[in-house]
Image (cartoon, rainbow, N blue to C red):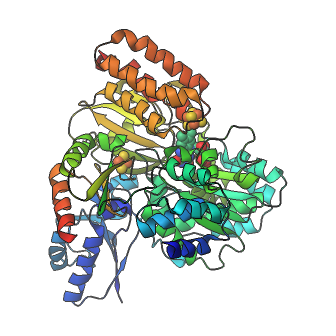
Amino acid sequence: MSITIFVPGDAAALALGADEVAVAISTAAAKHKLDIEIVRNGSRGLFWLEPLVEVITEQGRIAYGPVTVADVPSLFSANITRGGKHSLRLGDIETLSYLAKQKRVTMSRVGVIDPASLSDYRKHGGGKGLELAQSMTSAEIVRLVTDSGLRGRGGAAFPTGIKWKTVLDTTADQKYIVCNADEGDSGTFSDRMVMEGDPYCLIEGMAIAGLAVGANKGYIYVRSEYPHAIAALNAALDSAGDWLGDFQIEVRKAAGAYVCGEETALLESIEGKRGIVRSKPPLPAISGLFGQPTVINNVISLASVPDILAQGAANYRDLGVGRSRGTLPFQLAGNIKYGGLVEVPFGLTLRELLYDFGGGSRSGRPLRAVQVGGPLGAYLPESQFDTMLDYEAFAAIGAVLGHGGIVAFDDTVDMAKQARYAMKFCAIESCGKCTPCRIGSTRGVEVIDRIRAGAHEQIPLLRDLCETMTYGSMCAMGSMTPYPVLSALNHFQEDFQ
Amino acid sequence: MLNTLNAIFAKHRHQPGALLPILHDIQHELGYVPDLAVPEIAKELNLSRAEVHGVLTYYHHFRQSPPGKHVVHVCCAEACQANGSEALANHAATRLLSGDIKMEPVYCLGLCSIGPAIQIDELKLHARVTPEKFDKLMQELEVRS
Ligand SMILES: Cc1cc2nc3c(=O)[nH]c(=O)nc-3n(C[C@H](O)[C@H](O)[C@H](O)COP(=O)(O)O)c2cc1C
Ligand code: SF4
Ligand code: FES
């Protein structure tokens, strides 16, 4: 029987040489006359160990990493195919503490299965949610999702079930399910990992959403920076056969505008227009894509649904704290020693993520600032590291969890420069519809430049400008850019002196 | 060029909101979206030229002039900044000042734990790129082309 060896095809693993390692492994196997099958799985999300190679043995899935091409001959001399001893041997993957300490729910199959195989997906529990949904009424599905307590994972944390109910209750000949896979936030990659590592889970979630609201057409809007995710989704859809019944999904490639992650700009973009934010009302749930009622959800929101159906609402709701139910796949990024994907129930502290999982900075210097929730999220100083990972606890300190991206900086960071970058990013990415955002961000860059050059009396002007942006902008691009700017100013004043 | 355009148009004729997919296909085939394509697209989709031009220029991804032989995207977003991407971007800009490899900034490639990250020719990814590693990669590119 052939031996199964996993070499991740995830973009992060590829960036670290996984393709070359896969070639070296198949060459070495041929040389040793070993019958092997290489599966290109997703990534487990332990990026300091990528390329992380796993072998199915009697003792479990034995992991080796990080593997380079140069290591492959010695791995074969050490009998890697039977889980042999080697300095890169990490043991049974499931026992690695970084993974064992997590609670993988939404991401449970990522890195485990062959993302290109529907039958492997089903063998690992996939498909049960859709099967159940097919035996339920729309209203029952919506109630179950509402009961699970799931809130949108794209940033705004709006209850998913309530959004679906609005679409269900709006009558129309055509409704749509749109998946927001624009994942523009720096420090985030969980959407990418799902699309590359478990695409059928997202597809199943969309089909369930279709049954829940009466929609038979779905779009996945994926950022153009993710060619591997686009390929994985298209491959999965091509071999889905009649699994989805009459529900159809089309993958749409975005074109590099951050603001197109905003839901109404995204809809404009699918319609073939400039990605300019629409004024609300009407809500997309009532008049969305091509003017029809539309569910628009983030990848993680939709990918959480199959498990919620299969395991029941209570199972999901029982995880978490307060009004933050279930799990969030956090992403540890930036200057962090053990960067990667950490899916845990809400309720840990930021400090636990940064140190118990992340191991502190990559550079070995003290961590000074951590930006949570992407480019529109606040910078937190050390004194706030004990904040609980919970939407409301973060709101209470003027911060956001957003899509769960956590970007760590060590003590060499210049926070005035980071504040300037936040304004600059807003100036580059603003859709231009409203003045506070379009003009305010450019003025913001100029004011910060003057402050950095010594004009401290301009600090009140910067605060004024932030207030105008906060209250005068139409969407979060303009209204939340002040989060990183003001948090930098408030917590790291010395950098503005 | 007209043949290329017509083949692309035919492929998207029944797709609602086909403008972005059409622009992507043109750029994929030709490397950029030439001015001459704009009136053709407008005619095909029953839009005004101004509308097509507006969309084409709105999105960072679309190019209106031929790119260099190779394009290197250097991530300039926060998580890569935390790992020294500014120094890398400055180095890359100087290194690529002459020659036909062009550098463009990109705001996140989804490799935020292993930055600084770069992407070559919109596909090939590299992580933890130091200036030395960057030079090596560019040398390989130059040799290949
Ligand atoms: C400027 C801006 C960018 C956004 N980018 C994204 C994104 O990349 N992905 C995403 O899921 N949501 C993004 N959002 C949030 C969406 O507008 C919307 O809330 C989300 O798609 C709803 O899905 P959810 O309820 O499942 O979170 C962005 C919002 C703004 C204002
Ligand atoms: S806040 Fe900025 S991005 Fe949002 S609608 Fe206004 S101009 Fe556009
Ligand atoms: S910030 Fe550079 S890859 Fe995400």
Q: Residue at x 56, y 68 (%)?
A: A200
Give the percent coordinates (x, y) of residue A490: 40, 18
Q: Is residue A393 visible?
A: no
A483 to A232, vertically: above or below? above
Give the percent coordinates (x, y) of residue A483: 48, 27
Q: Is residue B92 visible?
A: yes
How many marks are shown on the rendered structure? Answer: 0
Quadrant where the image shows the C terminus of chain A: top left
A253 to B114, vertically: above or below? below
Q: In which quarter of the view is residue A42 placed?
A: bottom left
Give the percent coordinates (x, y) of residue A319: 57, 46
Q: Residue at x 46, y 55 (%)?
A: B62
Q: Nearer the viewer, residue B4 or B95?
A: B4
Q: Residue at x 67, y 43 (%)?
A: A159
Quadrant of the picture in which ligand 2 is shown: top right
Q: Residue at x 49, y 19 (%)?
A: A465
Q: In which quarter of the view is residue A36 placed?
A: bottom left
Q: Nearer the viewer, residue A449 or A128?
A: A449
Give the percent coordinates (x, y) of residue A53: 30, 69
User: Image check: B130 left or right of A103?
Assistant: left
Furthest-top residue in this view = A457
User: Image check: B67 left or right of A306?
Assistant: left
Q: Nearer the viewer, residue A52 or A429?
A: A429
Quadrant where the image shows the N terminus of chain A: bottom left
